[in-house]
Image (cartoon, rainbow, N blue to C red):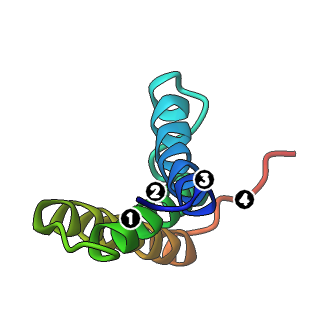
Amino acid sequence: MLSTGHQIFQLIGALCILVAYVAHQLKWMRSRSPLYNILNAVGSGVLGFYAVWPRFQAGFVLLEFAWVAISLYALVRNRREEMHAPEIPAAD
């Protein structure tokens, strides 16, 4: 059994994902926002770590590390799109 500290760390990881999901569903956060993708990547990374340690769980390893990869890809893609977007002149 994992210590209380490890379980709290897992709860924080799960809460990161849930906060992003709820905020997106309630339209408080866009799925393209950096915070949304950071919350998903961090939460999935934490849970992915515990899917590997202390006992390897293949299904959770696949799920969590795929979630991390997709979240990081979206974060980078959105950042690149913002950097290459044409500037729109401000209306006076």
Towards the viewer: 26 or 16: 16
- Please identify, in this view, whether the residue under mark 4 or under mark 3 is nearer the observer: 3
* Residue type at tag 1: Ser
* Residue type at tag 3: Ile
Residue hosting label 4: 89
Q: Earlier in the sequence, mark 3 or mark 2?
A: 3
Where residue 62 appears, x then y in whole percent? 16, 67
Residue hosting label 1: 71
Horizontal side of residue 68 vs 5, given as left or right:
left
Label 3 with label 2: CB-CB less than 8 Å = no
Where residue 76 appears, x then y in whole percent? 44, 76
Q: Earlier in the sequence, mark 3 or mark 1?
A: 3
In the picture as drawn, the residue positioned furthest to the front comes out as 1
Q: Earlier in the sequence, mark 2 or mark 4?
A: 2
Q: Secondary structure at mark 4?
A: loop
Mark 3 to mark 2: distance in Å? 17 Å
- Please identify, in this view, whether the residue under mark 3 or under mark 2 is nearer the observer: 3
Q: Earlier in the sequence, mark 2 or mark 1?
A: 2
Horizontal side of residue 50 vs 26, given as left or right:
left
Q: Secondary structure at mark 2?
A: helix
Q: Is residue 11 above or below residue 70?
A: above
Q: Earlier in the sequence, mark 4 or mark 1?
A: 1
Would you call the spot at circle 2 few (<14 residues within 10 Å), some (14-19), or many (20 or more)? many
- Please identify, in this view, whether the residue under mark 4 or under mark 1 is nearer the observer: 1
Residue hosting label 3: 8
* Residue type at tag 2: Asn
Q: Secondary structure at mark 1?
A: helix
Q: Secondary structure at mark 3?
A: helix
